[in-house]
Amino acid sequence: MTASFRTLRWRRQLWLLVTLAICATPALAGAQEKNRLLRIKVQPHHGYTRINLVFQSPPDFALNRGVNRVRIEVHQADAPSFKKLRSYGDANVSGIYCSSREGWLQVTVPTRQPNAGVELIDFITPNVLSLDVGPALKRTPRADIAPGREPILAGIEQFVRDFGTAPPSALPFVPTDIKTLKRFLPDNEVDLFQRAEGALYKEQGSEALELFGYFANKAPALKALAGFRSAQAFYVMERYDEALKAYNAAAALWPEYPEQAPELLQTLADLKAKNGDFKGGRALFLRLIERFSGTAYSGPLMNRLADLTARHGDTSAALEIYRSVVVHAAGTPAAERARMKLVDRDLFRISRDRYQELLEKYQRIYAAPCDFTLRDEALFKIALMQGLYGPARAGLDASIEYQRRYPRGIFSTIVKKMREELLLPVYREVYAGHRDQALVQLALENKEYLTRCLADPEFAPRVAEACRKAGQLAQELTLFGYLVDRSWAAGSAPFMLARLVEDALALGNLSLAQSSAQGFLTRFPKDPRTQRMHELLGRIAFEQGDLKRVSAELSFLNQKGRQAQLSESNYYLAKACAAAGDHPGAERALTRFLSAPPEKSPLLADGYLTLAGACASLKEYPEALAAYRGGLKVASGESADQMRYKMGEIYLQLKMIREAKGTWDELVKKNPSGTWGKLAAESLADLAWRLKIAGELP
């Protein structure tokens, strides 16, 4: 007997047993009535041909591929001969043949090219099979994902292929009957045993194992009960060798007990398969399927058998079982779990132009009745499909939706990385579209996931510019305040911390500006922006009225060759120097400030006034007069009056009596009631009295 013949015989036996189990379910028995292929519709497309097979009810089928043909076998079905289609031909197929044999309908499609590309779409409409044949469906070695999505695919593909959410136990966990426990244990120890079972039910394997260990030296029957539960605890902890040993030891003490607690037989079946005894595990599952035929447990048990069969490497047999569950247990969570297994085959094989078809399948699974973990997995795969094949914005939105619904979901770590990757192309799209407010909002709403965006050195400056244009400095303060201390944002931290200082100053938050600037100097002492930070600290100190601190921060500007990055810094330094009596320092700083004054600066008038005062203190009277004249070009009102009055005083120092008198006369005429006008009048009177005494009046 050849290996292929033995495999075929095993599949037929399995099929018969599975069918019997399903047919025994009263609610599903009607599904086993004879099906019929009603019509065939052929639709040629560019690169492939689609053949739609429309059945009376959802078909129970298997797909077989040969070198030059494709064959679909449908159980318990028949069809008309469709003789006209035998002569159909196009670039991809050469005829369609239908035949029935031993309760099986065979639809055979010869192909024009050897090993043609084939895809079967079986869940868009339950009673329609769509067979696509043609070179457009030939699978490429790599997934046909959207450009730039390679970082998402890397690592995820193998993980998703190897990992799926564990199906819930096909048979429910049933605590040990309390009457049985009370036969062997006092009440306090019954409570302890039940606590141990409670921990096992919650899948707290270590705690359960420790508690069950207390019963290791009890009577043989009780030791057996604890041994069976310990085996399940080891199973939860994935210590399968120890689990099987514990199970066998317990079975040696009480071999009949597992028949009273069939969930233990399911555990044994899994353990046998995981420890290399596939045939033994399969045989146990087949017994359980037969035992629970006609109940709601048959579908989940068949799924477990299919999982076991797939792990053993018999993918074709596993797919046949999954299809049976989908067709005959429709509307149940077990059917949706089986459907997920079937849909997963194309997750990394579908082409970008057809990914929507697969996406819709996952969406239907998510919307159908199913358990929590399967719904978690379905929504993850919806996000993954969009992330690999769809527009970046759709992928980002799907990832956010998964995190919103399942913040601690099974796939939350993977989805977090997907979100980080997808933010990069989305940000670039938004930036290219000059949508400043949208860029700010995108960054704020995803501030925890900007790792990949911040790998782009232009990201932080672009966001800062968008905040400026959109008038959203407060939002920039919030965003950069969050990011600046994140290790993954270290490359942009100097820029962001510097922006925090500027924004805080613009918004009048001097304490935040000061602490941020000081933090910048501590963290980045060699950064080119350190001088600017010192100058901003000088400005903050000036606005706080602390002129000594102004001098400490800005005194370096009076060193030879040093230039201010902010022209106002020279003004602040000059005021500090003047207050400290350092008139030469004040003169130097103000000379620099006024040599290239910032346009329309409110500090100009006072700058000229302070410079003139410093020059006068140094007895540099001509320089003082020049400063006052310069000041009068920008000053007005009270400030201009003060300069005119001070000019009169300088003229007196230079013995220029007529000029002093003329300056004060002009001031009195312009503003006789003003403070400086009154002082000028008093000074004129005093000047007249002194001249009279000196005999100099005419």
Image (cartoon, grey):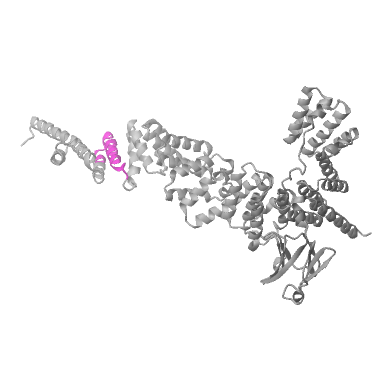
Name the side, left or right, on which 433 lies relative to 211.
Answer: left
Residue 658 coordinates in the image, percent (x, y): 13, 40
Region rendered in magenta: 601-624
Q: Measuring 52% from the left and 51% from the top, which residue is drawn there?
A: 458
Name the side, left or right, on which 160 lies relative to 73.
Answer: left
Residue 641 position by quadrant:
top left
> Is residue 297 magenta-colored?
no
Quadrant containing the N terminus in the rendered view = bottom right
Residue 680 coordinates in the image, percent (x, y): 16, 35
Q: Measuring 33% from the left and 35% from the top, which residue is drawn there?
A: 575
Farthest residue to the left: give it.
Answer: 698
**In the image, is residue 92 above or below residue 449?**
below
Residue 116 coordinates in the image, percent (x, y): 75, 68
Farthest residue to the right: give it.
Answer: 1
Between residues 594 and 34, which one lies in front from this camera angle? Answer: 34
Residue 474 position by quadrant:
top left
**In the image, is residue 410 above or below residue 11?**
above
Between residues 53 and 680, which one lies in front from this camera angle? Answer: 53
Quadrant containing the C terminus in the rendered view = top left
Q: Can residue 199 be seen in the rendering of this structure?
A: yes
Residue 56 coordinates in the image, percent (x, y): 72, 63
